[in-house]
Image: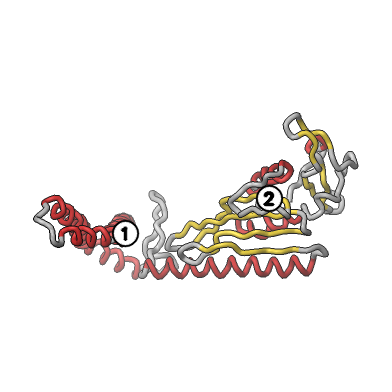
Amino acid sequence: MTEEVVSLKNAAEKMDVLLDTLDELRASVTQEKLTQIRKTLFRGQGQSFDKSITHKLAKLCADAEDCVNRFEQLLTESKNEFQHAEATALEWEINQPKFITGSSFDEVPKRPSNHAQEMQNNTQLAKNELHGILDAWLVRAKKDRVYNVELEKIGTDAKGRLQGFMVSFNNVIKAGVSLTYEANYESTILLVSRVATFGYYEKKKIHESSDILLFQRITQLAINVLQQLDQKNIITELLDWISNYHDLFSLPCHKCSKFLAFQNPDDKFLLPIWRIVSEQNGRILSYHGGCLTGVVIFEE
């Protein structure tokens, strides 16, 4: 079986090269280059013979032709290995992908037969799931919470995927969340690229920062918490964590019972912005940073 595994490895590596070359081929015929060709031809109309224009046009065509030739050469060189790999895989009576790993090299997943279509399907799936997650969370939040909760979806990228959203709680705090995506032929991964909190009446966009020191400090806490959340449920857990600040101006520090406490020479006096889950009853307790001494922190 060793020869077959090595053959499959080689075939998979060549398939990667082929796909990279195909991407390069597609990139060589971009709208920008087509526009450049049209401009080059237009400049030559009604003018005397211009060698520089001819050379530019010839270079554009040569680049695309060279990429096509290299792709055809790789395809020819890989034909036998692909056929052998396919025949070997069909003989294996195990439920594994066509390009399978051996103990001596990294796993190479099966490439879909239609790379572009698979990427599009994954993008659509991620888009639908995200809208479903946000819609379901908002329905639950409005039902379970006695205070006002609003969520606004903001912007889409070229593939129609949501770029972010703004959520607000109890007319006290808003949070802007920016999203990015990492896509491949297997899946599309959703990433929270940025989070920022604002006062409810601040007129800010999701990629901006608050002008109020209090909310700048809450943003810093949110960034730290973001690293601790379950990445599979990061959207709902982040929203639930931010919702803990709905009583920011009405919940005193659990330890000193004060609203304002001196923090440091830079921040001066701040409200208790730390939110800790009580060990006894699971309640959310608020603390000043300086009142956390001896407190076991269970951040939500």
| Residue plotted at (71% across, 46% down) | 215
| Quadrant (top left, top right, bottom left, bottom right) of the N terminus | bottom left
Q: Nearer the viewer, residue 17 or 269?
A: 269
Residue 228 drawn above or below residue 260: below
Q: Which residue is mark 2?
A: 197
Q: Outermost residue, top direction?
A: 265
Please provide percent x and percent y for residue 37: 22, 60
Around disc 2, counting alpha carbons within 10 Å, would you say few (fewer than 14), some (14 to 19), or many (20 or more)?
many
Q: Outermost residue, right direction?
A: 257
Q: Which residue is mark 1?
A: 23
Left or right: 36 in relation to 274? left
Please provide percent x and percent y for residue 272: 81, 43
Left or right: 113 in relation to 158? left
Task: Say which label, 1 or 2, has the lower sequence index.
Answer: 1
Around disc 1, counting alpha carbons within 10 Å, would you say few (fewer than 14), some (14 to 19), or many (20 or more)?
few
Please provide percent x and percent y for residue 47: 13, 58
Left or right: 51 in relation to 223? left
| Residue plotted at (30% across, 58% down) | 32
Name the residue type under label 2.
Thr
Please provide percent x and percent y for residue 13: 31, 55
- From this viewpoint, is residue 14 visible? no
- Give the mark count: 2
